[in-house]
Image (cartoon, grey):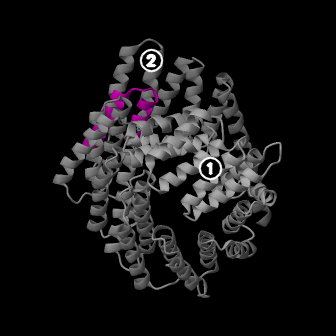
Amino acid sequence: MKRIILTLIYIIGFYTAANAQLSKLAANYFNNGEYEKAAPLYKKLYIQNNYNDMYFVYYYKSLMYDERYEEAIKAIEDQLKTKPDKIYLLVHEGYIYEKLNKAEKAKKIYEKAIRKIGSNKVQIIKLANAFKEYSYYDYAKKAYETGVDKVDDNILFLMYLGEIYALQNDYDKMIDYYIAYLKKSDNKYSGQNIKSKLSKSLSKDKMTLLRNKLIENIQENPDNMSMIDVLSWVYLQLGEYEKARRQIIAIDRRFGENGSRVFKFAQDAYKAGRYATAAKSYQYIIENKKRNNPYLMRAIRRYLNITSEILVKDTTTTHEDFLDIEKQYNKFIDDYGIGDQTADLVIELAKLEAFNLHNIDKGINTLKDLIKRNYINKKYRAKAKIVLGDLYMLKGEIWESSLLYSQVDKDFKEGELGELARYKNAKLYYYNGDFEWAQIIFNILKPATTKLISNDAIESSVFITEAIGEDSVTAPLQMYAKSELLIYQNKFDQAISTLDSINFLFPKNNLEDDIWYLKAHIFKKQKRYELAKKMYEQIIEKYPEELRADNSIFELAELYENAFGDVNSAKALYEKLFLDYDSSTLAVEARKKYRQLSGENVQ
């Protein structure tokens, strides 16, 4: 008995392998256009594999492509005698008659196929697909329309009809059928299905039409989540972020969701430069979700970060505005305690205290308190040490900064934290005039895992090489580096005096554009925007090929956008940057900003 079983296994295995080899050979012939050789092989495979439909399709197609039309027609008719329910074969038969210039005969066959439609959903889909294969969209519509009438579970046919009208560029009808589909198929996948189909179909005018029709239908079907979901997506495509926010929050409220949809929208709004809308979205989560919600703490952090960012960029921000946001930080930290979940909040609070409220000692004490808490994750304490190093540098205690950066470098040899600490230490060497050692570290950091650190390291290394020049005179660069540190420490008058001394003491230095660039930064911090504008314009005009040119274009564009409210001038500069400086690390961001200012939806 065992021998018989083994023999059967061997025979079956041999047959399967032979069948696979024959199928591969037939496919090779078919794909290479050798239809005369492919046809008999597919016929053999069709018979050997219990009259498998897939092999029959390739059999008659081989005959048809080989222009053996009569044989193909006979094969199809013979197949229909044994399998009359395969009405999609009539489409292929009709197509062959068209190849024989018998259009009327073909038309009768197509209409016969439509008449023979029953209540089998799969049969209808196969028939419509056969019509679509030859771009006979009107017949495909008839097949689906007949299906809508004859099949109870006909929801998918509504979507398929929408697809056909899209292929015919009849977007009004497409919209009507997609909305009909959403009305009848209200589940979590329905809206996503339609959004994926619409993403490349509609102009702004048609998207507006879709919006209006959705609003009209939602009024009649206020609980239809799919239509509300698609409407919120349409608002995003039209750049109507506030309307989208209201719809998305309505979905979250109505269906008791956990805020995931709102959180994702807030992220997209932020990426698109809609900071106020993003902040309000995070605020909704904060005010409406419980402590155990998985998005709550991230929403708090993002809300505070964005609000602070808005205040920093707003030229009308006052000291009291920063005091208000400081109170919000303290409230959340008091409510949730100091731990791993709130460590980032504490670090951001310290930065706010030192850089925006100009209370460096308060920021230092905030960070020291966090670092001494041994139960806090080592990663968060390392982040705090880096920021504490920044604050000591702000205060002028350079070696305290270096000690903290070195501790993080030692503890995190691999990864972003270690690289950041290393970079900051290199900047300290640079500020101190030790350019050789600074450049060694910058060069080591060129392949850093973090793109920002890598780009900054490359730029810093190139700048040192160009600034020192062939004569190896470092005195002008030492004064320039000292000025950078003074600016970081908000000692603006000293910085300007030092920068002016460079040209007086070293009239042949090659730092003129760099000096203007630093002065522009000082004037921006002092809100003397016209002077900053003048500095940037001089760099762009006189040094278009130098290291500071692309940065100057971008920063001048930001000035026009945020300080002067001159959108057209900002757009022109962003465009200049991504067209004339396409290799710049700022080119992608400039293109994004240009599109945003042009009213495009950028996510």
Residue 84 visible to an observer of this rendering: no
Q: Is residue 139 magenta?
A: yes
Give the quadrant of the N terminus.
Answer: bottom right
Q: Quadrant of residue 186?
A: bottom left
Residue at horizontal 73%, vertical 67%?
414
- What kind of element bears circle 1? helix
User: Identity of the amino acid at label 1?
Assistant: Asp
Q: Quadrant of residue 275?
A: bottom left
Q: Quadrant of residue 541?
A: top right
Residue at horizontal 46%, vertical 67%?
356
Count of labels in the image: 2
Provide residue 540's location: percent of width, then percent of height. 57, 36
Dot 1, how many residues are within 10 Å of its Cα: few (below 14), some (14-19), or many (20+)?
A: some
Note whether 126 is above or below 32 in the view shown: below
Residue 556 visible to an observer of this rendering: yes
The residue beneath circle 2 is 97
Question: Farthest front residue?
Answer: 504
Note whether 370 is above or below 67 in the view shown: below
User: Identity of the amino acid at label 2?
Assistant: Tyr
- Which mark is in front, 2 or 1? 1
Q: Is residue 318 magenta?
A: no
Q: Main secondary structure of the magenta part?
A: helix
**N-terminal-most mark, 2 or 1:** 2
Q: Residue 319: which numbered mark, if any? A: none
Dot 2, how many residues are within 10 Å of its Cα: few (below 14), some (14-19), or many (20+)?
A: many
**Viewer-nearest residue: 411 or 10:** 411
Provide residue 124's location: percent of width, then percent of height. 37, 40
Q: Residue 500: which numbered mark, if any? A: 1
Provide residue 281's location: percent of width, then percent of height. 35, 63
Which region of the structure is painted magenta?
Answer: 123-149
Residue at horizontal 40%, vertical 79%?
332
Question: Farthest top residue?
Answer: 101
